[in-house]
Structures are given as structure tokens and as C-alpha cells.
Amino acid sequence: MKNKKEAGIYLISIIMGITIGLIVFTPIFESQLLGTVIGLCLGVMMGPVFIKSIKST
């Protein structure tokens, strides 16, 4: 069950990152592809942070 929870949190963080990328970075760079890639990178980087913070509580 623990691995499913971590995978779910990781997936949610990737979706959040892509959403942030589309909303924030697409208008700045005027490119949807670049906004999506930046958002994906943010989501992938946020996932381990969320998982680590949940494990510590």
C-alpha cells in the first residue's frame, strides 16, 4: 500500500507541475511546448519533496 501511495503522490505532483507550467510559463514564453516541459520538470522535482515530507510526519 505504501508504494501505491507514493506513486499517487508522485503522479499528482507531476500533474500539478504541468498545470503550473501551462498557466504560468506559457504566457511568459509564448510557447505551450516550453511551458509544458518546464512544468513537467517542476512536477518531477516536486514529487520526491512531497514524498519525503509525508514520510517524515
Image: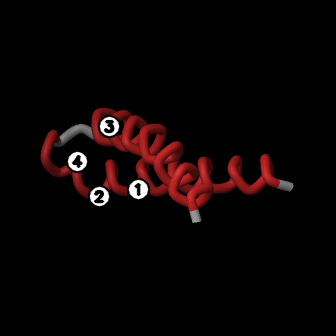
Task: Compute the Cα span from label 2 to label 4.
Answer: 6 Å
Residue highlighted by disc 1: 19
Q: Amino acid at mark 1?
A: Thr
Q: How is the image coloured?
A: secondary structure
User: Which x, y percent locates residue 41?
Assistant: 39, 35
Q: Nearer the viewer, mark 2 or mark 3?
A: 3
Residues tagged 1 and 2 counted as in contact (Cβ below 8 A):
yes
Q: Nearer the viewer, residue 13 or 49?
A: 49
Residues tagged 3 and 4 counted as in contact (Cβ below 8 A):
yes
Q: Amino acid at mark 4?
A: Phe
| Vertical side of 16 occupied by 39: above or below | above
Residue highlighted by disc 3: 38
Q: Residue furthest front?
A: 56
Specify the quadrant of the image occupied by residue 31. Answer: top left
Q: Secondary structure at mark 4?
A: helix
Task: Compute the Cα span from label 3 to label 1.
Answer: 10 Å
Residues tagged 1 and 4 counted as in contact (Cβ below 8 A):
no
Residue highlighted by disc 2: 23
Task: Compute the Cα span from label 1 to label 2.
Answer: 6 Å
